[in-house]
Image: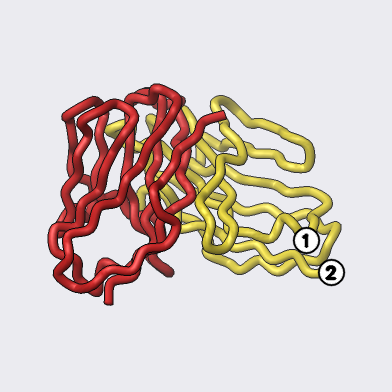
Chain colours: A red, B yellow
């Protein structure tokens, strides 16, 4: 079974803090993704990566950055947290960029910015 | 037209009922499709993959209608435990999965 592990289930931070969300997958997947999910807005793609040190902007990259130094690890960084970044953050991975590959999700991190 | 659209519901059905929901997509070149189940405050979990005309797994059947560009999920003999939100996912022109907003199903005793 694919295992995608996110470092925290719940996190509370203050406005202006730099926040790191970590994600690790154990299946040697090439692609990794970061989404946020808010009521009524569905899953929105923040950033994705298709290889080590490679990153691509998704639909809502503003206020975020990412890092992929190792294949199994994909980090999401909130440079200066703001209250509108309070959300459920979901990491996912897929084997490669082919159409036939589903994405597998981690448990999610519920982040609150005070 | 949105890339992937779903009726948000909720679909309220009694136990034992058969229920179906659709997911329409705009990318006619899509070759594979996925249904996910998401419980409240949990992550989406892969339920079924659809690579050709359809797929069946126990009480769940997924069907693809390429001409009308939609996929459907049919659940027979609904259980209370089927209550969840069901998301469809379809590759876009760049082979990135695009997720629908989800359809909420509530199965009542």
Label total for image = 2
Residue drawn at point x = 19 percent, y = 57 percent: A78
Residue drawn at point x = 83 percent, y = 51 percent: B77
Tag 1 and tag 2, C-beta contact below 8 Å: yes
Expressed as whole percent of the image width and height from the top left, the position of residue A39 reads 43, 69
Q: Residue furthest bottom?
A: A114
Expressed as whole percent of the image width and height from the top left, the position of residue A77 reads 20, 52
Residue drawn at point x = 51 percent, y = 57 percent: B102
In the image: residue A78, left or right of residue B86: left
Label 2 resides on the chain identified as: B
* Disc 2 residue crowd, few under 14, some 14–19, many 20+, Cα 10 Å: few
Expressed as whole percent of the image width and height from the top left, the position of residue A5 reads 44, 41
Instruction: First in sequence, mark 1 or 2: give its number.
Output: 1
**Gap in angstroms between the C-alphas marked 1 and 2:** 7 Å
Q: Which residue is mark 1?
A: B80
| Towards the viewer: B59 or A28 | A28
- Look at the image and tell me whether residue B27 can be seen: no
Residue drawn at point x = 73 percent, y = 49 percent: B75
């Amino acid at each position: 079974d694919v295992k995608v592990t996110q470092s925290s289930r719940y996190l509370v931070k203050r406005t202006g803090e730099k926040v790191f969300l970590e994600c690790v997958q154990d299946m040697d997947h090439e692609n990794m993704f970061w989404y946020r999910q808010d009521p009524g807005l569905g899953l929105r793609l923040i950033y994705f990566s298709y290889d080590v040190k490679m990153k691509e902007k998704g639909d809502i990259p503003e206020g975020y950055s990412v890092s992929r130094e190792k294949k199994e690890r994909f980090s999401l960084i909130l440079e200066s947290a703001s209250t509108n970044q309070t959300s459920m953050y979901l990491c996912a991975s897929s084997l490669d960029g082919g159409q036939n590959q589903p994405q597998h999700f981690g448990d999610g991190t519920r982040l609150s910015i005070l | 037209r949105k890339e992937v659209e779903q009726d948000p519901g909720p679909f309220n059905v009694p136990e034992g009922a058969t229920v179906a929901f659709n997911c329409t997509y705009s990318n006619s070149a899509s070759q594979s499709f996925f249904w996910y189940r998401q419980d409240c405050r949990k992550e989406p979990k892969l339920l079924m993959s659809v690579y050709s005309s359809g797929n069946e797994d126990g009480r769940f059947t997924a069907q693809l209608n390429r001409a009308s560009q939609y996929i459907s999920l049919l659940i027979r003999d609904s259980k209370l435990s089927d209550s969840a939100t069901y998301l469809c996912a379809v590759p876009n022109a760049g082979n990135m999965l695009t997720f629908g907003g989800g359809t909420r199903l509530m199965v009542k005793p």
